[in-house]
Image (cartoon, coloured by chain):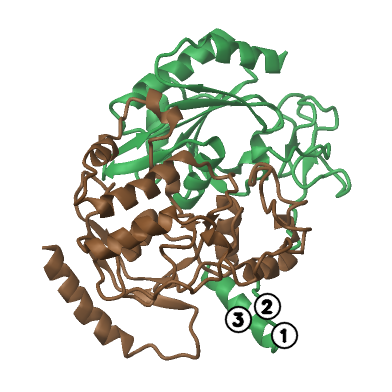
Chain colours: A brown, B green
Amino acid sequence: MMRRTSTILLGLVLMASTGLGQGSPTMTVIQGGAFVPLYGSDSAEVAVAEFELDIYPVTNAEFLAFLSENPKWQRSQALRLFADGNYLAQWAGDAELGTGMDPAAPITSISWFAAKAYCACEDKRLPTMDEWEYVAMASPTAANAQADSVFNQWIIEGYETPNTARKKVGGNFANFWGIHDMHGLVWEWTSDFNSVLISGESRKDNDLDTSLFCAAGAVGASDLMNYAAFMRYAFRGSIKANFSVRTLGFRCARNVEK
Amino acid sequence: MLKNRNLTWLLMVLCLGIFASGCGDKTEAESALYQCPMKCKGEKTYDVPGSCPVCKMDLEKLSSEDAGPVLADGEVSDESIFHLTSQWHTQNNEVITLKELQGEVLVVVMIYTSCQAACPRLVADMRNIHAAVQDESVRYIMVSIDPETDTPERLKEFAIANEMDNPQWTFLQGSVDDVREFSNVLAVKYRKITPLDFSHSNIISVFDQKGVLQFQQEGLGVDNKQIVAKVKELIS
């Protein structure tokens, strides 16, 4: 089933890619399709409609430019409601990167609210978790590399590598869609990250998310993709929207106008 | 949205060559605020002219210096939910922003009306808190996590069915996006499981008169003592 879907996808994308040809685009079109996420609705296939996604995560330089236009998101101005005390903690000042910070490295230590505001200013939005995962399962050669053990091994190794967030964006391969750095650089905010109910606080809740716990139990040598995905979902389940985490950045998405 | 984009284009055309994102801090056209001259409701302000619900005197327009960005007395906490600018529909089909709820203690829960399992118990918890607090100034707010189903009409039916159709109880329908944002302010998690069902955290939150979160009760059917004590402390 999945194989057939990806073959269709491949055909679609080849047809579509001929239509793209402006200067150096910052976004690219992701053809819609269906996939089975680790953590979906009743482990059924999830449909993802066609959308556009930033090719790279938002950089320090880009966020700096946003701050000069939007002082209310500068470190000294940002409301505590929207950003915790670690917001832009490594920065030297309101409009100055910290020493050793690369302008071309991904912006991190920003809250979900700040990321959301940034995207809104670009007339974009944060990608949904399903959209993000859909793109993240693409290797350089396949739209769906869920079963590719080499690819999955590489993702896991990326999670084990320290300080990747200080690298420049674009250092990792372009995947099937032409999107860089879905893995190997930073974690990324998604619009509905708080739909994962596995944090400590949710243990008291009635609705146990057995799908995730089962997935955790199912981790084995042949289940590397699930293991990598589980780490992402678990991370999402552990953060709150005003958190500013040093390894957590974002990129923006946009609906395709019909 | 489309209009916004057109505006952005216009701006970009106007400042040729300048890399304008079109989204600088807009000098937000603050709508005027009105207040009761007798301050019957303390520092409470209103967005529209009218008369004071208590003494019936005409509301007075506040000068712009008086009107802070959110609160009239200028003391806006960084953590106040009144910074949220989202608009909501009540069960009476009125459009409000959260800051219109300022001045009263708020007890807030996120539910959806077609919920069969947890929500009836959450609603029962709200009712129990209401009964134990026994103060008419406290506002009880139910925010729907299923705004596509929970229209104002449906919320109204729910309010009537649960005998909550009076000014102390406010049911809110927002956009999908604004509900998600609000849930993030409360650190409430939720997810659509089927077209009709959501899983969600069971959290009741208490906000003080300035919109700052003071207490959260987690779980279903837990002892309400602490949360009731907190509400009483805030209104005294």
Query: Can you see residue B183?
Result: yes
The amino acid type, in three-letter code, at marker 3 is Trp
Answer above or below: position of A156 versus A231.
below
Tell which of A63 and B226 is nearer to you.
Answer: A63
| Neighbourhood count class around disc 2 (C-alpha, 10 Å): few under 14, some 14–19, many 20 upward | some
**Snapshot quadrant of residue B202:** top left
Answer above or below: position of B26 versus A242.
below
Q: Measuring 38% from the left and 88% from the top, which residue is drawn there?
A: A20
Horizontal and vertical percent for residue B187? Answer: 51, 36
**Snapshot quadrant of residue A207:** top left
Horizontal and vertical percent for residue B112? Answer: 37, 35
Answer above or below: position of A173 versus B135.
below
Q: Are marks 3 and 1 in contact (CB under 8 Å)?
A: no
Label 3 and label 1: CA atoms lie apart by: 10 Å
Q: Are marks 2 and 1 in contact (CB under 8 Å)?
A: yes
The amino acid type, in three-letter code, at marker 2 is Ala
Q: Earlier in the sequence, mark 2 or mark 1?
A: 1
| Neighbourhood count class around disc 1 (C-alpha, 10 Å): few under 14, some 14–19, many 20 upward | few
Residue B20's tag is: 2
Tell which of A110 and A103 is nearer to you.
Answer: A103
Secondary element at image label 2: loop
Name the residue tied to disc 1: B15
Q: Earlier in the sequence, mark 3 or mark 1?
A: 3
**Snapshot quadrant of residue A209:** top left
Name the residue tied to disc 3: B9
Q: On the picture, is B215 further left or further right than A173?
A: right
